[in-house]
Amino acid sequence: MVYLLALSIPAFAQNPKFAPVRTDIPMGGSLSPRQEEPVFAVCSKQGMRILVSRDDGKTWKQTFLATDSREDGGWHGNYAVYGMAYTEGVIGVFSGWGTPGIYIGSDDGETWSHLNKEPAKLGSAWGATGGKGIMLTAADQWRGITSSSVTHANWKKHSLRELLNGGKTHHIICGFGDYKGGRFLAIGDNRQVFFSQDLCKTWKHGRIPEGVGDRGQQAIAFGNNIFVCSFQEKVARSLDGGMTWTLHDHGLKGSAAWRGLSFVNGEFWLTGRRSGGRRSKDGATWNALPSGTPTGRFVQSPNGTIINVARFRYDIKRSTDGKSWETVFTAPGGKAKAKDVTWDTAFAVYGKVNKAAK
């Protein structure tokens, strides 16, 4: 693992095809999380538009926007978002694909800064996760994976070259589960698996067996002491913290929703892009979700409230029982019809943050 090189922010990621990198966002290093107040937070696929609810998901307030540029529709660019994470009082949002990464965070959901204390060329982000006070982003075989210090002020790149031993991988997603004190996973193309048993200090390598495509890993979820990774054809399941995997039919008809795997109500939920979904308690046997279950991803509070977002839908849905759903936020006037991806609500987290200043 190597320390990231310090650079001045204007010195990189100024590709004219993409929105310019903002130089007015303050640097990090001053977070002081006290975990005083529960919030839900949602982020757009493009532009880092962040919406926060402090009343159990009933009403929403925009607290940050990096840019209203659509770049290339949220797929590449400085502000193409590929991850959102929460851990121990801090919310992180991660963008940058085809560019260096931009990592921002907040300890109250209102005031946002770079997570890194000093300007640095951070790793691109195809996925992000958090747990035990650590955050992790993942990219590919060249840019590796990048983990934070417990203050999130400093970041380290972990090279995957030796673990791959000549193999190749790309489009790495990542996940965290409270397995034996905390387990971080990163899964990329060609069914390559990387897992850490010591909170990102060291990494080991595994493989998902043949039977799914060499590309197409969508999302990682953890629950009931089980890791599940979704693919188009099947799901992969690990009972030993990501070391070994088995494949199982999920029974979903048609294409899955973008990163539409979640763990809610004590079970895994996998939803289709347009409709339909499957659920499982053990990741091996899957049954139909109730009709009317929305597509996309879900995040749940300890009191049972569920928030749902989905790529290309431009709204936020809420449920208190997982059966009936209410749309509690819709992108304003014509934004959805215009496919303004800076309003494309695609990521959601729940956690306790500091009370907002009056």
Image (cartoon, rainbow, N blue to C red):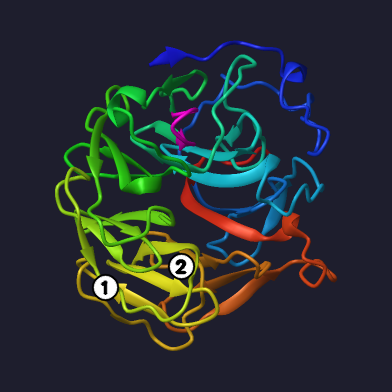
Q: Report which quarter residue 230 is drawn in.
A: bottom left
Q: Is residue 107 above or below residue 330?
A: above
Q: Is residue 128 above or below residue 20?
A: below
Question: Do the CB atoms of the residues marked 2 and 1 lie less than 8 Å apart?
Answer: no
Residue at 40% from the left image edge and 63% from the top image edge: 261
Q: Which residue is mark 1?
A: 249
Which residue occupies the foreground of this view, 325 or 69?
69
The residue stretch that appears in magenta? 137-144
**SS state under label 2:** strand
Main secondary structure along the magenta-highlighted residues: loop
Q: Residue 319: x and y, percent?
A: 49, 75
Which residue of the protein is positioned furthest toward the bottom in this rendering? 291
Q: Residue 310: x and y, percent?
A: 57, 66
Q: Is residue 91 left or right of residue 313?
A: left
Q: Which residue is mark 2?
A: 306
Q: Residue 145: x and y, percent?
A: 43, 30
Residue kind at label 2, given as amino acid type: Ile
